[in-house]
Amino acid sequence: MGIIGNLSAEQLQSFNSQGFLVIESFASPEEIESLRNRVDELLDEFDCSSSVIFSTKNHSHAKDNYFYDSAENISFFFEEKAFDDEGKLKQPKKLSINKVGHALHELDPTFRKVSYSEKVSSLLSSLGYKRPVIIQSMYIFKQPGIGGEVVPHQDNSFLYTEPTTCTGLWLALEDATIRNGCLWADPGSHKKGLVRRFVRGDDGVYFDRPSPSYDQKNFVPIEVKAGSLVVIHGDLIHQSFENQSSTSRHAYSLHVVDTDGCSWAEDNWIRRKQLPVPLYSS
C-alpha cells in the first residue's frame, strides 16, 4: 500500500527537536461531533456497577482484571473524586467517568473510522512507520472540578517495544487550556531516553525503578483548539494537572507502535491474544 507522508520538513524538524508537534484543524467539526455523540451513547448503555477507579498516582486500577481485560474491550474508568465516603457517585455518571478504553479503535465503527483514516496513516508514514498498529485508544473526559492529575510520564514506559517505537496521538475534542487541564511537556526531554518501565509480573504491575524528580519550570503548556492533534514522542516527558475549572476537556488519544523490525515486550501490561490489524504495511 502506497502511503504518502503529510508532514512538512519544518514540522518534522520541530517534532524531532521538541518531542511534540501540534497540528491544528486535524479533525473536522463533523468528526469531533461524531466521536462525542458516540461516547454519549456508550455511556448511556454502560452499567456503572462494573468498572474501576483510574489513577496515575497509585495505579490501584492496575491490580484488577477489569483493567487487564480492557486492552481488548471497551471499558469504563471512574475519576478518583467521583465518589462520596459511602462509595456512591456524587454526580451523574457522565460527569464522573475518567476515561473509556482501550480498544475503541477496533470495536466501535465510529472510532475506528477516525482512527484508521488516511490522514492518520499519512502522518505515521511521515514519522517513518513501516507497519504501525494502534495498540490502545482512550476517550479522556477530564471532568470539570474533578478531572484528575496525570503525573509526568513517558508513553514508552507503558507500551515498550525493542527498539522503542511508541508515538502518542492526542486529539482535542474541546479547547484545552491551562485552566481546564491541558497537556504540559518538557521540550527536548525525549532526547535523554527512557527513564523507567511499567512492567507486568506474576504479582501485578509495577515500575522497575523510582520516578525521578522533575523541575516544573522546564514544562510548557500545550494549549490547543478543538480539532487540533498533538503528536507526542514516546520518550517525551509530559503531564497534565487537575481540572479545577467548570468546563470539561474531552480528548481522544491513540498510541501507536511499529511491528516491523521491532518486538513487543512480553512484560508489558497489555497482553493481547493477537496484535491489532496494521494501518498499512510498506
Image: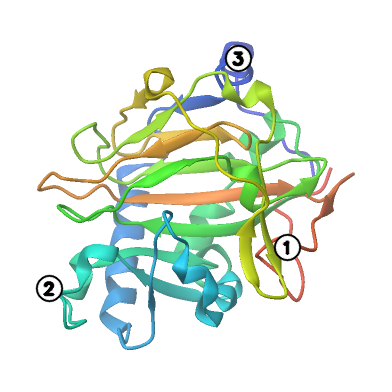
Q: Nearer the viewer, residue 67 or 7?
A: 67
Q: Residue at x 53, y 51 (%)?
A: 254
Query: In which quarter of the view is residue 56 placed?
Result: bottom left
Query: Which residue is labeled 1 in the image?
Result: 277
- The residue wearing badge 2 is 90
Amino acid carrying mark 1 in the image: Val
> Residue 237: percent from the left, percent from the top?
53, 32
Residue marked by disc 3: 17
The residue at the point 81 percent across, 51 percent down is 259
Q: Secondary structure at mark 1?
A: loop
Please name the amino acid that badge 3 sits on.
Answer: Ser
Residue extending farthest to the right is: 261
Q: CA distance from mark 2 to mark 3?
A: 44 Å
Lateral position of residue 124 relative to residue 228, left or right: right
Calculate the distance from the C-alpha at mark 1 to the C-alpha at mark 2.
Answer: 40 Å
| Side of 70 relative to 203 (left or right) | left
Marks 2 and 3, the one that precedes in the sequence: 3
Q: Secondary structure at mark 3?
A: helix
Among the two numbered marks 1 and 3 on one chain, the one whose residue lies closer to the N terminus:
3
Q: Which label is found at residue 233?
A: none
Colour scheme of the picture: rainbow
